[in-house]
Amino acid sequence: MPHSFSNPPEILTFGEAMAMFVADSPGDLSNIDRFHRRLAGADNNVAIGLSRLGFHVGWLSRVGTDSFGGFIQAALTAEGIDDRYIHADAQHPTGLLFKERAQNGADPRVEYFRRGSAASHLTIDDARNVDFQALNHLHATGITPALSESACQLSHHLMEEARAHGASISFDPNLRPSLWPSENVMRSTLNELASRADWVLPGLSEGQLLTGQKTPYDIAGYYLDQGASAVIIKLGPEGSYYRGNLDGQEESFTVAGCHVAEVVDTVGAGDGFAVGVISALLDGRTARQAAQRGNLIGAQAIQVVGDMEGLPNREQLLALEVDQPIG
């Protein structure tokens, strides 16, 4: 597949993108006639967010050779994503999802058509051309290893290789219980992957489920004991909690959330948070500044209908940070 970059990407994300059809009006999906087509997928949301902030980002995946696969690749290249690691799969289709139009800030219902998708057939072989020497950072989510055994093996492989080549690694558990054979398999697999990451980014309820701990302090302690250098926990409207040793000594603190006048769609908030944290740390900001930027970009994401339409470019981010000074 064509790509216009001479140098390989410095940041890599990987997983499944889907064509998403969002209902034009509220109500049960069975009664909706009209939908808008958009792009969905946690790891490509993060890729887009980081690309908009000026980072050279690659995304590794498989898409079908169908029109939806073409749509996904065109949408990502339009966002400045390096597409050299996107593989076209003639044997399997691109995944789809349909999403309700949410009301009153509620989580919208989503119906997936992704079983047997091209991305679920990802394997270690799909990483054979990855230039790990060029890599500064790898972002992984807990969705990709849930797609299939081979996609899980790919997740392990990419994290091992990134670590071996000195890249930093972020991990967002992104729990999707319906994709896993059992809660125990989900818990053990994701905790093992988290142990390979430098920065772990769970939501509070995700952290409680995965670690068996109740408080943000103890959830963070669980992952710090496994080798993470920072754990940044999403607390929803309350903001975020940090515990780690990024700035030379262990510290912990909570950063208040950003006020949002109207919540339009909560999907994508965690991806926006990840974009904020990762970009700030790669920019050399402090842990507190990273948590604050995570809150800030997460708050942008929930004010629009799409998953990634609210992610700012660098100029917009600077304006937001002027309005809401970052520590």
Image (cartoon, helix red, strand yellow):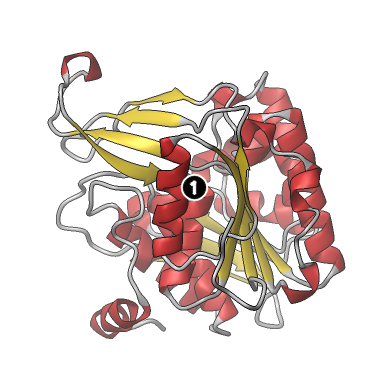
Left or right: 120 in relation to 130: left
Q: Is residue 204 above or below residue 55?
A: above
Residue 234 in sight here: no
Task: Give percent across and percent down for residue 256.
Answer: 36, 65
Q: Nearer the viewer, residue 74 or 241?
A: 74
Please determine whether, in this image, residue 262 is positioned above or below residue 88: below
Describe the element under mark 1 as helix, strand or loop.
Answer: helix
Looking at the rendered image, the quarter that the N terminus falls into is bottom right
What residue is at 47 percent from the left and 34 percent from the top?
A: 66
Depth order, front residue of 58/186: 58
In the rendered view, would you say 252 is above or below 71? below
Residue 162 appears in the picture as rendered: yes
What residue is rendered at 69% in x and 74% in y? 136
Image height of 312 relative to 171, above or below: below
For the C terminus, the image quarter is bottom left
Q: For the point 51% across and 68% down, which residue is it?
A: 277
Q: Position of residue 234 (x, y in %)?
A: 47, 53
Q: Which residue is disc 1 drawn over?
A: 42
Query: Of the residues shown, which amino acid type is indicated by label 1?
Result: Ala
Q: Residues within 10 Å of mark 1 (few under 14, many from 20)?
A: many
Instruction: Please give left or right for residue 4 compared with residue 133 in the image.
Output: left
Q: Position of residue 278 (x, y in %)?
A: 55, 69
The answer to which quarter of the image holds residue 35 is top left
The reply, left or right, for residue 160 in relation to residue 190 is right
| Residue nearest the observer in this picture, 26 or 239 | 26
Q: Quadrant of residue 143?
A: top right
Q: Nearer the viewer, residue 317 or 31?
A: 31
